[in-house]
Image: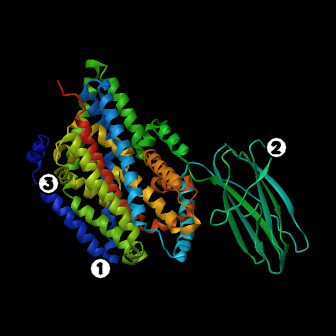
């Protein structure tokens, strides 16, 4: 038995009963959601209160704990070796998770022989989610519109040009509104782009399978609203539309909007670099962007270690705040079974009412089983082997010690909200030193996303398989998916709708129709809980491994 297990047993007290109560509350909540879904939804307010209490303490706890950890080291330079080991662990386990996801999805092939009608229906639903992801990016759309209404005998021929505010990958959405019957010649528009404002080139439209479909967008002869979207080249700075109104009918008009297109790996990595620094510390606190808060806390506490006696009052204040917050978490955990019951009952009940939960699981059973199987391999084999090799701890005893945090992560589907519980369990039950929990766990909750990376790689292959022969899934494309999923999972910190946005990155990297994200959205809320639990366990194992690299206190 490892000596690290001793403190956990001494401090365990009633924690074993609490874990049992949490398990019972989750099972009871799921049963109630299936039997009485509308009643289960009424518990949402209790779940939201519990979730908000957890989120309320995250920011002060992260800042106080990271500062306490640095102050405990006595010299910020001692953080170099543990910091390097933490980053290497995060990157290595993410790569292994992606490899596991690719292996499982290729062996089980959950996307093969899917009903084309099912795929097409969900592709339409996916278009709404894509729009939601685009809007979540920090860019405003540019809109220009022709509102001229022409008589039956008149043909409008108009050209309008828009200069983009910056050179970036953009999505051009064009809408043709055609009014009146007896239309003889449909309205049409040719979109052109330029990188210098002088030489323009027509945009190539693509059909639903991603194949070239001409350089002209023409409406039909029936009165209706026709819409198409196309991603513009990254170097485009000017957009021009050549519009010809319909002949016959009453009138036609065109409108267009420029919004951010599918994000790329470069966008995510740029975001990660910028997220290390904040222009407004309070704004980062409000939006719970932990990465810049961690950077600030490290720098500020490191500065305090150089000031000697002058900083002692502030240092004591920080340590006292940290201890008080941990006591608050211990108090909050006494109500965890009730809060977790409310969270799970409300979410599963909503799924049962809105989407025929059991029927949806039956239809998507192969895909759900594939993702959960991959996550199980990573959580029950890969991470335990790594943990045992580097610490010689029994990984399954360690998993039981972290069970409260893992179950809370499953219930909240948020690594950030679960962070207070994770830190308390790691220190008081798993016997990990405060030096490691106070630095490794906040950082891990921000950038260590093993479960997310595995899920995104498996989901991308599943979507490619659902297209059958319409999409050639080569080895090279699978490698691109693996690299994209790894980098996207690591670099997604601080992105709104991060899971959705990074999934679009992976699909876009290999040319898969991003609207097919609709195939996985209906069950994403369920799988999100499993991958969050895996992320949480991976963070805790990382803290145990990195703990050994801290220098022994004098």
Say whether disc 1 or disc 3 marks the residue closer to the N-terminus. Answer: 3
| Disc 2/disc 3 C-alpha distance (Å) | 70 Å
Q: Write down the residue under mark 1.
A: 35
Q: Are marks 2 and 3 in contact (CB under 8 Å)?
A: no
Structural crowding at the residue carrying mark 2, measured as other residues with C-alpha within 10 Å and reported as few (<14), some (14–19) or many (≥20): few
Counting from the top left corner in percent of width and height, residue 367 is at 41, 67
| Disc 1/disc 3 C-alpha distance (Å) | 30 Å
Structural crowding at the residue carrying mark 3, measured as other residues with C-alpha within 10 Å and reported as few (<14), some (14–19) or many (≥20): some
Q: Write down the residue under mark 3.
A: 15
Regarding residue 64, the answer to whether it shows in the image is no
Front residue (pair 188, 519): 519
Counting from the top left corner in percent of width and height, residue 436 is at 25, 37
Which numbered mark, 2 or 3, is in the foreground of this view? 2
* Numbered label tally: 3
Residue at the spot 66% in from the left edge and 61% down from the top edge:
229
Q: Write down the residue under mark 2.
A: 198
* Vertical comparison of 104 with 73: above or below: below
């Amino acid at each position: 038995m490892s000596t690290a297990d001793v403190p956990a047993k001494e401090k365990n007290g009633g924690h074993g009963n609490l874990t049992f109560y949490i398990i019972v509350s989750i099972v009871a909540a799921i049963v109630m959601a299936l039997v009485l879904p509308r009643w289960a939804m009424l518990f949402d307010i209790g779940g939201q209160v519990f979730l908000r209490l957890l989120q309320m303490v995250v920011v002060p706890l992260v800042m106080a704990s990271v500062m306490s950890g640095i102050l405990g080291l006595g010299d910020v330079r001692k953080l170099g070796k543990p910091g390097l080991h933490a980053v290497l662990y995060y990157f290595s386990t993410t790569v292994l998770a992606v490899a596991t996801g690719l292996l499982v999805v290729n062996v089980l092939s959950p996307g093969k022989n899917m009903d084309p009608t099912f795929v097409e229906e969900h592709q339409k639903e996916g278009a709404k989610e894509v729009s939601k992801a685009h809007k979540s990016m920090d860019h405003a759309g540019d809109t220009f519109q022709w509102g001229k209404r022409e008589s039956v005998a008149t043909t409008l021929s108009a050209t309008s040009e828009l200069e983009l505010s910056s050179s970036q990958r953009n999505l051009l959405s064009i809408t043709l509104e055609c009014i009146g019957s007896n239309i003889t010649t449909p309205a049409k528009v040719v979109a052109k782009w330029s990188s210098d404002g002088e030489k323009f080139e027509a945009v190539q439209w693509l059909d639903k399978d991603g194949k070239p479909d001409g350089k002209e967008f023409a409406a039909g002869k029936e009165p209706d609203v026709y819409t198409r979207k196309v991603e513009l080249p990254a170097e485009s700075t000017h957009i021009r539309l050549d519009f010809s109104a319909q002949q016959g009918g009453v009138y036609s008009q065109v409108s267009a909007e420029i919004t951010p297109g599918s994000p790329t790996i470069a966008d995510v990595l740029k975001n990660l670099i910028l997220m290390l620094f904040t222009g407004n510390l309070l704004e980062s606190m409000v939006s719970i962007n932990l990465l810049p808060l961690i950077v600030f806390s490290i720098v500020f506490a490191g500065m305090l270690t150089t000031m000697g006696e002058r900083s002692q009052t502030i240092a004591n204040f920080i340590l006292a705040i940290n201890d008080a917050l941990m006591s608050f978490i211990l108090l909050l955990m006494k109500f965890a079974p009730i809060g977790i019951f409310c969270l799970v009952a409300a979410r599963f009940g909503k799924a049962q009412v809105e989407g025929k939960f059991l029927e949806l699981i039956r239809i998507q059973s192969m895909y759900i089983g594939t993702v959960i199987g991959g996550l199980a391999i990573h959580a029950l084999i890969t991470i335990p082997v790594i943990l045992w090799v580097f610490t010689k701890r029994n990984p399954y005893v360690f998993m039981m010690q972290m069970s409260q945090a893992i179950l809370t992560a499953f219930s909240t589907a948020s690594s950030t909200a679960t962070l207070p519980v994770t830190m308390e369990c790691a220190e008081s039950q798993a016997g990990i030193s405060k030096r490691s929990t106070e630095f490794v766990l906040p950082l891990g909750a921000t950038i260590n996303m093993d479960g997310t990376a595995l899920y995104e790689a498996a989901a991308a292959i599943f979507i490619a398989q659902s297209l059958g022969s319409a999409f050639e899934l080569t080895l090279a494309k699978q490698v691109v998916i693996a690299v994209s999923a790894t980098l996207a999972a690591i670099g997604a910190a601080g992105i709104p709708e991060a899971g959705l946005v990074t999934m679009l990155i992976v699909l876009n990297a290999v040319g898969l129709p991003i609207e097919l994200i609709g195939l996985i959205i209906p069950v994403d809320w369920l799988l999100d809980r499993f991958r969050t639990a895996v992320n949480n366990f991976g963070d805790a194992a990382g803290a145990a491994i990195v703990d050994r690299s801290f220098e022994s206190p004098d």
